[in-house]
Image: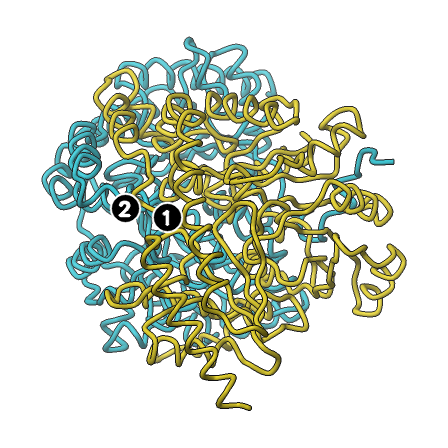
Chain colours: A yellow, B cyan
Amino acid sequence: MTTGLDWSAAFAGRAARMGASEIRELLKLLDQPDIISFAGGIPNPALFPASAMAEAYQAILADPALAPQALQYSVSEGYAPLREWISGHMARQGVPCGIDNIVITSGSQQGLEFLGRLFLGPHDTALVTAPTYLGALQAFNAYEPCYDTLTPEGGNRTPESYARTAAERGGKVKFAYVVPDFANPSGETLSRQARLNLLDLAAALDVPVIEDSAYRELRYEGEDVPPVLALDVARAGHIDRTRTIYCGTFSKTLAPALRIGWICAAAPLIQKLVLVKQASDLHSATLNQMAMHRVATAVYGPRLPDLRAAYRRRRDAMLAALQRHMPADCHWTKPEGGLFVWVSLPDGMDGAELLARAVREARVAFVPGKAFFGENARANTMRLSFSLSSEQAIETGIARLGELVARTVSRAA
Amino acid sequence: MTTGLDWSAAFAGRAARMGASEIRELLKLLDQPDIISFAGGIPNPALFPASAMAEAYQAILADPALAPQALQYSVSEGYAPLREWISGHMARQGVPCGIDNIVITSGSQQGLEFLGRLFLGPHDTALVTAPTYLGALQAFNAYEPCYDTLTPEGGNRTPESYARTAAERGGKVKFAYVVPDFANPSGETLSRQARLNLLDLAAALDVPVIEDSAYRELRYEGEDVPPVLALDVARAGHIDRTRTIYCGTFSKTLAPALRIGWICAAAPLIQKLVLVKQASDLHSATLNQMAMHRVATAVYGPRLPDLRAAYRRRRDAMLAALQRHMPADCHWTKPEGGLFVWVSLPDGMDGAELLARAVREARVAFVPGKAFFGENARANTMRLSFSLSSEQAIETGIARLGELVARTVSRAA
């Protein structure tokens, strides 16, 4: 009687949007040792504070006064001393706040998923840049939104235009989502004026701004631009009167595998997010929060200069190699920080087709750009990450890639 | 210009269902040292394998070959050796399966949330027992379901009746959810026949069964009943043809704070859940998965007898104390395992009102039963947990509670 169930037929309508990710397949390429991979947008494990981590776990688990607490259920909002540390960190970024403005999430990815669940109904519109972070699109997609395109640097459309488009699609604009610093995938940074314009647009539409700050600490040159939330606090006078929701993470500064991120926002929103957190997984791992608090306290600030120097050398190598090896009709961003360079290939060239050939013929991998668009994807694009490769491997890989692109162009001509 | 946002107005419709939990408030009572609390349904921290945990983290983080992997991003389905261990564990429970039938979740709570997201649309119906696990209701509520009531032991209604009721409410039956072993909150265990009847009902409705097995290993007397999934595999011939979704966890057997649980089910469903996991938080903490694999391998089986003995003594103390101290018109379950006794108070008595007086007048806490119902809540109920208190504290607390109930009865008379 009990025979196979047609799982797809049993799912809710929204499940159709929970689609496969090309990234998963691409990550498998990293396992092939002769591939030079610019695909994985992940930090360099040689830069993890492994000994500080080992000391922190040892200090907690060997202490009979701490171990039982570290292994027990805890509160959904997160470990209070860690939230204290984060509120101090936010204050140093120009965002004075208290621990009631902080909820711990399992990486900033979880924060994005929670915000999709809280804000998006079917046919509602999320405003995103083009390109935008693929993981955010994946998190939002379950809630069946439409996407409309922000152009914060060039000047967005009018609030009325966004509202009208959203209404035509059967919903409302629910938020604007940006990665303002050294964005994944574009590497670009929003100017102060673009951030202020974004706040104006959000105020006119009366919607929140989601600020995904994953790469903020990884600046290699130029001057810091204040977080959107800091500009919002400066205008509103107090964080509890702001509309900006700041998603932070330790993944790029300390280590990703502990899955510790946070959301910093107005207290009434944080209170709701604590309930969402409780229903979702009760709380993030207690032990990891306690360890992260110790490691952040001990090494966060002191290690940033070395971290930045190590990534800057790789970025410089990649920009120099692109300059040397890419054909004339390719263009790329010049990121002041982060982990990514975004390349526009000649018109008509498809990044996904190029990848298939790149792996086969040049033993080089990257992420085709198409997946990073909410709408109107531009296929002639690719994301290159310089975080994992040595300067020598970057030179070799980009030379091979440039040669392949040149060959493809001349074949098409 | 940027002034406070009306957050509630900005939320999606479903957010209204993401409600506050009384449990949160109750947990705060645990901090008052003179309160004897039977409220927290959490394991006893004195029983955590703290030294095995300390050794596992030390062995991983002090090893330069392991630490970078342990601190890095990893695959969404989970750490393969841990999934291997779990597939062996499932086989020992009568569920032969491979690692493609296992996805790691951040506690079984996250599994429940994923399943709600995958299956439930607004107005769809989830079949649950009365009472049922509060955390499951919280996880499902975001997806705006209706609830209808299973009575697996007494005989469920006909499939046609459930289907008709669901249709009248504007949706379909999407799954049946049960905690078959020593349920939270009732302490009751479904008989083999009740489990088979449940599979028949689910087959007739062509829906999945969600089996929440959180307490399964904590049996103190009587004989194991096979998991619903084992019965399903025995009928269907292979796990990939089953309809049962088994949610497992290490929270009650090893430690909850690592947030490591799993779902074991047909491979096509697991593949979809891996995508949901990726969109939700990328993966569970790599380090914790590696540590849990070591600890489970080293101590899981050997420590179960001590764990069961320690909880059995507390259960016996609570049942004896209830017998001694509760007035004649109270009834309670006699659990063969788990952490909970479910008490029916005299008609007309409200568990929530009793709690307020119990904390004030008797310095005893418990969870009022009302929150544990999907529909038609019975207010004259309470959940008592015996996990955290000594046998002496159980005797004292139940004596005080029985005295208060008797006093309340006589006052009402």
Would you call the spot at circle 2 few (<14 residues within 10 Å), some (14-19), or many (20 or more)? many
User: Quick one: label 1 or label 2, which is nearer the N terminus?
Assistant: 1
The amino acid beneath tag 2 is Gln
Residue B197 screen position, x and y as percent:
36, 67
Q: Are marks 1 and 2 in contact (CB under 8 Å)?
A: yes
Q: Residue lying furthest right in this view?
A: A160
Find numbered disc 2 in the image and state the secondary structure of the residue it sits on: helix
Residue displayed at 41% across by 10% down: B33
Disc 1 versus disc 2: distance between alpha carbons?
A: 7 Å
Out of A329 and A224, give the one closest to the viewer: A329
Residue displayed at 79% across by 58% down: A172
Residue denoted by label 2: B289
Is A253 on the left-hand or right-hand side of A91? left
Q: Is residue B38 above or below residue B217?
A: above
Find numbered disc 1 in the image and state the secondary structure of the residue it sits on: loop
Q: Is residue B259 above or below residue A92?
A: below
Q: Chain of mark 2?
A: B
Residue denoted by label 1: B284
